[in-house]
Image (cartoon, helix red, strand yellow):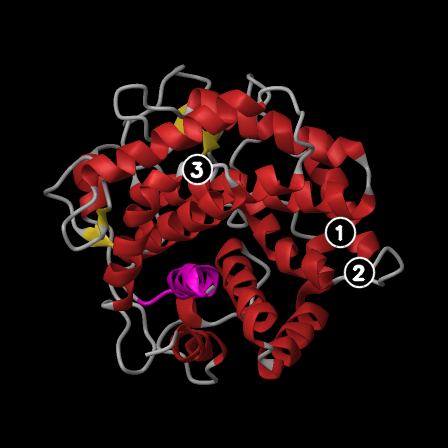
């Protein structure tokens, strides 16, 4: 089957009027919905699906006021697609994008090392002094894009700062991969787990942020080295199916599709850009085959783990439930769009 047909099948499930669950419904201004929107945007940009453009415009009108009220690092993911949909600096939503950008660089909670604290929309969950890999995707792609679109260096500078901090403090020096989180209170990586989706967020966001930054930013070489070191880790632990397991270096954990798709997306794009060594092309190609096998006849992507905080131990990650969910659909769409040409 052609990639375009697969993308349509998977993306259609994200705008389904009768979704199988709440986590398959794009209705809120939050990170799950934001990643879903980004996937829809990629499908529309790649193949010109007008129905997704109409859906996204309606979503923006219904949700953009929430951006002024819901200030969190994780929820900023919803702004990526909104910013990309802005036609120019006279677009009515540019002020909203600047408002959120100013919140992140001036008012968002920080850890003691200067990283963005991982804040979420649910007030019942507070991760004081914790930095998570997720933040690079949820907030820093947006910052880098905002800097590029507006020409305002402060946004790009913050993206660089966060990129370097996350690569420094989350790096697993033994495997080349990344831990899920870091605590500035205990000064460690908490459970020290090489969680797969955290790594996928790192790969995908690092490549996208690199595309948007000046080629001479301080620390660029160390980021490129770290990125390729991570991909080498993927190559070492990738299963014969092409998939990676939810704890990448633990073969007893289950294969996880959203992480595999995000990994493949980032590697493919990184090789095209010259950031990742082309010798790793087989890693993403085998991953693509593995992910495609997880798409059912209705377009649901199987093998996707539900929302996951930093768990206390390996078993905690293995026990996370599997269900169809927007970011699994979106990362699969992004991967398919990227590998098609």
> Which of the two labelled residues, at mark 2 and mark 3, occupies the earlier sequence position?
2
Q: Is residue 275 left or right of residue 293?
A: right
Look at the image and give the residue range highlighted in magenta.
Answer: 324-340
Q: Residue 15: where, in percent of width, then height?
A: 50, 78
Q: Residue at x 47, y 59 (%)?
A: 338
Q: Marks 2 and 1: in contact by CB < 8 Å?
A: yes
Q: Per the image, is 327 magenta? A: yes
Q: Is residue 53 above or below residue 234?
A: below
Q: Specify which label sits upstream in the sequence, 1 or 3.
A: 1
Residue bearing the label numbered 3: 276
How far across and down, in percent of the image, does residue 14 sit?
46, 74
Residue appearing at x 44%, y 37% in the figure: 276
Q: Which residue is mark 1?
A: 97
Q: Disc 1 vs disc 3: Cβ atoms closer than 8 Å?
A: no
Q: Position of 218 compared to 173: left or right?
A: right
Seen in the picture, residue 203 relative to 297 is either above or below; the reply is above
Question: Which residue has dot 2 on it?
Answer: 93
Q: Is residue 315 visible?
A: yes
The percent position of residue 231, horizontal first and vertical second, equals: 34, 36
The CA distance from mark 1 to mark 3 is 31 Å
Residue 247, position as x, y percentages in the image: 23, 40
């Amino acid at each position: 089957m052609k990639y375009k047909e697969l993308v349509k099948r998977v993306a259609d499930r994200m705008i389904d009027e009768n979704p199988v669950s709440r986590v398959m419904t794009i209705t809120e201004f939050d990170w799950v919905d934001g990643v879903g929107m980004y996937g829809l945007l990629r499908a529309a940009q790649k193949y010109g699906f007008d129905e997704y453009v109409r859906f996204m415009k309606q979503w923006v009108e219904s949700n953009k006021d929430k951006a002024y009220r819901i200030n969190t690092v994780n929820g900023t993911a919803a702004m990526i697609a909104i910013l990309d949909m802005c036609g120019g600096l006279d677009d009515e939503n540019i002020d909203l994008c600047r408002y959120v950008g100013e919140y992140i660089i001036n008012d968002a909670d920080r850890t003691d090392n200067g990283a963005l604290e991982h804040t979420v929309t649910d007030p019942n969950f507070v991760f004081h002094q914790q930095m998570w890999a997720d933040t690079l995707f949820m907030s820093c792609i947006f910052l880098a894009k905002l800097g590029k679109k507006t020409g305002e260096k402060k946004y790009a500078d913050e993206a660089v700062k966060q990129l370097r901090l996350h690569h420094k403090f989350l790096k697993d020096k033994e495997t080349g991969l990344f831990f899920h989180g870091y605590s500035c209170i205990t000064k460690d990586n908490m459970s020290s787990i090489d969680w797969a989706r955290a790594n996928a967020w790192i790969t995908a966001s690092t490549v996208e942020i690199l595309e948007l930054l000046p080629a001479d930013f301080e620390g660029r070489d160390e980021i490129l080295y770290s990125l390729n070191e991570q991909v080498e880790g993927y190559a070492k632990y990738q299963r014969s199916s092409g998939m990676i397991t939810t704890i990448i270096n633990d073969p007893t954990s289950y294969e996880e599709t959203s992480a595999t798709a995000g990994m493949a997306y980032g590697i493919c794009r990184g090789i095209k850009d010259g950031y990742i060594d082309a010798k790793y092309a087989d890693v993403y190609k085998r991953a693509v085959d593995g992910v495609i096998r997880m798409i059912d006849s209705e377009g649901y992507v199987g093998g996707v783990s539900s929302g996951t905080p930093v768990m206390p131990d390996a078993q905690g990650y293995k026990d996370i439930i599997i269900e169809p969910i927007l970011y699994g659909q979106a990362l699969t769409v992004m991967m398919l769009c990227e590998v098609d040409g």
